[in-house]
Amino acid sequence: MARCDYCGAEVDLPFKCKYCGGTFCVKHHLPENHNCPGLKRRAEGRWFEVPLYERPREVIRVPPKPAIRFKVSTAEGRDLALATLSVFLVFLSYFNWPFQPLPIAYLMALTVLTYLTHELAHKLLAMYYGYPARFVLSREGFLATLVTALLPVPIKVVAPGTVVVEGVLSRYKLGVIALAGPLTNVAIALLARFAAHAAPTFSHYLYGVADVSAWIALFNLIPLPTFDGSKVIRWSAAAWFSIVIAALALWLL
């Protein structure tokens, strides 16, 4: 994996400039797009080659984008709340609508741990890389999630929205950001299983957290478009296979 000498982006197939010898992405591979030190501009805007003895020895590297401060707008907070509520209703439906305070509190905590943290992991990593990201409610996915939660159907849909990342991302960053959600679920499932061994009194609840978290990881790792798995497998089939095996093992234990 190479980095663009101008913007710092990671690229799979870099372009090498024949004038300055630098490595650049598709957006900056033309000499005029990376302020090529091997060329200089005439007053009328035309370019011509600079003699070798006049060229600088190194290409100036632009540092990567700084991380963006985490923030949630009012609209995004509303979308996250509605999406979390719809998933909570799916869990209530799956467990036959318990109306006692303890099961309701447990299922709400389960929703936050397994679903909300998954979406926030995508957002946090994208913002760490310097890309604006926000959770957006999908009208069709939200309605499908609500309908399958309220109706006694065997298959439940959990797809109320997604995290949208702005900007041009390399295949590596797309894959890593997509992997952040399932990887968070796998980590939660692993911690829940360890906690269940350490606290047998609460093992029933902790095993439930581990099973649901591992299932959400597996569901999102389906290697089809719109799923996290499609972006992960495009970046690294080995990473996709490894996380699938880990999630499957935690789910089947």
Image (tube, helix red, strand yellow):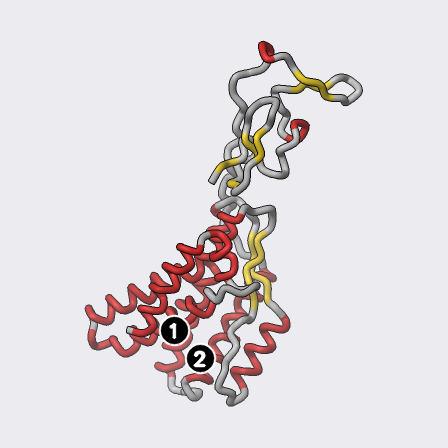
Q: Residue 91 appears in which quarter of the rendering? A: bottom left
Disc 1 or 2, which lies upstream in sequence?
A: 2
- Is the residue 2 above or below the residue 126 in the image? above
Nearer to me, 137 or 250: 250
Reply above or below: 156 against 251: below
Q: Of residues 36 and 65, which is closer to you in this image?
A: 36
Label 2, secondary structure: give it.
Answer: helix
Report x, y in % for residue 146. Answer: 56, 79
Depth check: give the residue in front, 60 or 242. Answer: 242
Q: Nearer the viewer, residue 179 or 82?
A: 179
> How many residues crowd around disc 2 within 10 Å: few (fewer than 14), some, or many (20 or more)?
many
- Which residue in the structure is indicated by mark 1? 212
Q: CA distance from mark 1 to mark 2?
A: 10 Å
Q: Quadrant of the C terminus?
A: bottom left
Position of residue 101 relative to residue 19, above or below, is below
Q: Name the residue beneath numbered marker 2.
A: 91
Label 1 CA crowd tier, 10 Å (few <14, some 14–19, many 20+): many
Q: Check disc 2 and give the amino acid type.
A: Phe
The image quarter containing residue 18 is top right
Looking at numbered disc 1 in the image, what kind of residue is underneath it? Val
Position of 195 with respect to 9 (left or right) is left
- Please tell me the numbered disc located at residue 223: none
